[in-house]
Image: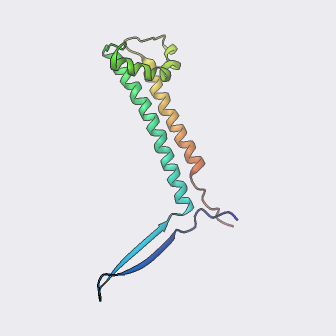
Amino acid sequence: MAQDPYETRVVQEEIVQTPAGIDAAKVERRTHIDPSPAERQLGTLYRAKQIVWLIVGLIVALIALRFVLLLLGANMDVGFGGLVLAITQPFVAPFLPLFGEQQARIEFSDLIAIAVYLLLGWGISKLLEILLVPRTPPTGY
């Protein structure tokens, strides 16, 4: 039998008395709440979307940094510029032929790459919602 994802939470409550002397007793109330299956599924969705947007955000930030460094004329052959160029090259390579740029002063393809990765992140996020949001129970039966 499948478990209803909208069933209520399980709440367990206990009261503990511990002696702290001859006549004294310390009373402690402990409450434990188990999330429902729907709440666990939403938690998984939330975490998955956080991971997707972390990855997309890092890629977009690095490509934007590349764009700014090239725009300002930074030396991309050494040091930090070389590191940024090496990390971002695989992400912008598919877009470089769009405008015939190879390390030009302004790479408009970087802006296209940023837009594409943001759209990709949005699409993955929506797909995760479709797959992981608990379905509402049917009504009218």
In this picture the colour scheme is rainbow
Query: Residue 85 at x, y = what percent?
Result: 41, 19
Quadrant position of the C terminus in the picture: bottom right
- In this view, which residue lies farthest toward the front? 22
| Residue at the image position 52 percent from the left and 68 percent from the top | 9
| Residue at the image position 50 percent from the left and 18 percent from the top | 93
Query: Residue 65 at x, y = what percent?
Result: 36, 24
Query: Residue 135 at x, y = what percent?
Result: 61, 56
Q: How many labels does the image show?
A: 0
| Residue at the image position 49 percent from the left and 72 percent from the top | 11
Q: Is residue 117 positioned above or below 128 on the image?
A: above
| Front in this rendered view, residue 140 or 40 | 40
Report the side of 134 relative to 119 (left or right): right
Query: Residue 131 at x, y = what percent?
Result: 60, 47
- In this view, which residue lies farthest toward the bottom? 23
Q: Is residue 24 positioned above or below 121 on the image?
A: below
User: Which picture quadrant has residue 5?
Assistant: bottom right
| Residue at the image position 38 percent from the left and 81 percent from the top | 17
| Front in this rendered view, residue 64 or 20 | 20
Q: Is residue 19 positioned above or below 134 on the image?
A: below
Quadrant position of the N terminus in the picture: bottom right
